[in-house]
Image (spheres, rainbow, N blue to C red):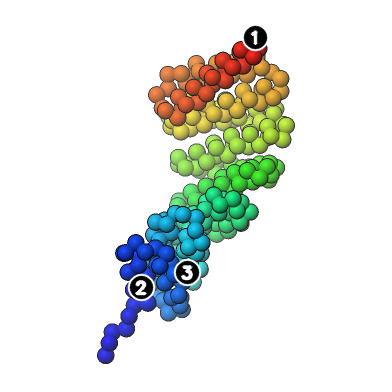
């Protein structure tokens, strides 16, 4: 009697041959009810591989992410595979949100980010929480890109309130970026004094950090503070803020920090010239 063929053989064969769209099409045709949990896990991995290999914003890439989510939802919450499944689903949702944002489908991206954050359910899995904080940041950025400043501020406040006390570079960087973007949003709403208060907090937290990424955030916050001071007609204070950046970070060896110093120097010189 002939051996029954594995329903995933066509998928695996297409992935091996780098025929990723064919792999996604074959996976879509596999009845999920015919799969055991190990096969579900295999198929999820195959779809994440295919989507990452495409990375073209196509319908096929988005379909692969949707397949991962639907397959993951078939695994019971109390299953031993569930933690690994959650990481795959989380990754698929995050990547789908990024792709939708890149395609200027911001409202759809926001809905996906909301789904991702809701699914974390207070999970303590580091990978889930890191993607959740990234998703919140991206949601805020999408709202800001649509000039929905008040909503963006609300998202940044949620991010900072939820994750500011958590350790790790990913969390610290996301919190710092969210606070800076909140400052920018406040300035866009013509609330520069509030923006300065938020940016001062960024500087206070991270200006002397040993992490160059966080020092760069502090320097960026000072740049935005100077812009807010100019917005309030306090050009003299803005000049001093630019000078502070040059003095504090002028000898910093980190390229991302030195980039902020170079911007401060150009802006200081331009402002000084305009003031005569």
Dot 3 falls on a residue whose secondary structure is: helix
Which disc is residue 263 wearing? none
Q: Are marks 1 and 3 in contact (CB under 8 Å)?
A: no
Identify which residue is drawn at 57% across, 25% down.
222
Query: Quick check: 103 left or right of 255?
Result: right
Which is closer to the viewer, label 2 or label 3? 2
Q: Is residue 84 visible?
A: no
Q: Earlier in the sequence, mark 2 or mark 3?
A: 2
Tell me: residue 154, above or below residue 12.
above
Q: How packed is label 1: few (under 14 Cα within 10 Å), some, or many (20 or more)?
A: few
Which is closer to the viewer, label 1 or label 3? 1
Tell me: residue 62, above or below residue 265.
below
The span from disc 2 to disc 3 (Cα, nearest Å) is 18 Å
The span from disc 1 to disc 2 (Cα, nearest Å) is 73 Å
Can you give x and y, in whole percent of width and height, for residue 96 in the image?
51, 56
Locate the C terminus by quadrant. Answer: top right
Q: How packed is label 3: few (under 14 Cα within 10 Å), some, or many (20 or more)?
A: many
Identify which residue is drawn at 52% across, 41% down.
174
Q: Earlier in the sequence, mark 1 or mark 2?
A: 2
133 or 48: which is nearer to us? 48
Q: How packed is label 2: few (under 14 Cα within 10 Å), some, or many (20 or more)?
A: some
> On the image, numbered disc 3 is attached to which residue?
71
Number of numbered labels in the structure image? 3
Q: Quadrant of residue 186?
A: top right
Can you give x and y, in whole percent of width and height, for residue 166 in the image?
50, 43
Q: Earlier in the sequence, mark 1 or mark 3?
A: 3
Locate the N terminus by quadrant. Answer: bottom left
> On the image, numbered disc 1 is attached to which residue?
276
Which disc is residue 10 wearing? 2
Query: Quick check: 87 left or right of 199?
Result: left
């Amino acid at each position: 009697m002939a051996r029954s063929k594995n329903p995933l053989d066509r998928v695996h064969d297409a992935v091996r041959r780098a025929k990723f769209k064919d792999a996604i099409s074959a996976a879509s045709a596999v009845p999920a009810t015919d799969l055991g949990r190990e096969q579900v896990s295999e198929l999820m991995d195959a779809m994440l591989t295919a989507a990452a290999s495409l990375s073209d914003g196509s319908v096929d890439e988005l379909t692969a992410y949707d397949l991962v989510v639907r397959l993951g939802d078939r695994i019971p919450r109390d299953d031993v595979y569930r933690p690994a499944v959650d990481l795959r689903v989380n990754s698929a949702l995050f990547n789908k949100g990024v792709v939708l944002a890149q395609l200027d489908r911001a409202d759809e991206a926001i809905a996906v980010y909301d789904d991702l954050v809701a699914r974390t359910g207070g999970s303590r899995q580091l990978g889930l929480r890191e993607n959740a904080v990234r998703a919140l940041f991206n949601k805020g950025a999408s709202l800001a890109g649509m000039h929905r400043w008040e909503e963006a501020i609300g998202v940044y406040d949620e991010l900072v309130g939820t994750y500011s006390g958590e350790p790790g570079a990913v969390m610290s960087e996301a919190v710092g970026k969210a606070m800076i973007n909140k400052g920018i949003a406040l300035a866009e709403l013509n609330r520069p004094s509030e923006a300065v208060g938020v940016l001062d907090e960024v500087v206070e937290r991270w200006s002397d950090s040993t992490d160059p990424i966080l020092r760069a955030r502090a320097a960026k916050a000072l740049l935005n503070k100077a812009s807010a001071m100019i917005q309030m007609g306090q050009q003299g204070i803005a000049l001093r803020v630019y000078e502070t950046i040059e003095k504090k970070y002028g000898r910093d060896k980190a390229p991302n920090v030195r980039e902020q110093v170079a911007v401060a120097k150009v802006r200081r010189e331009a402002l000084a010239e305009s003031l005569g």
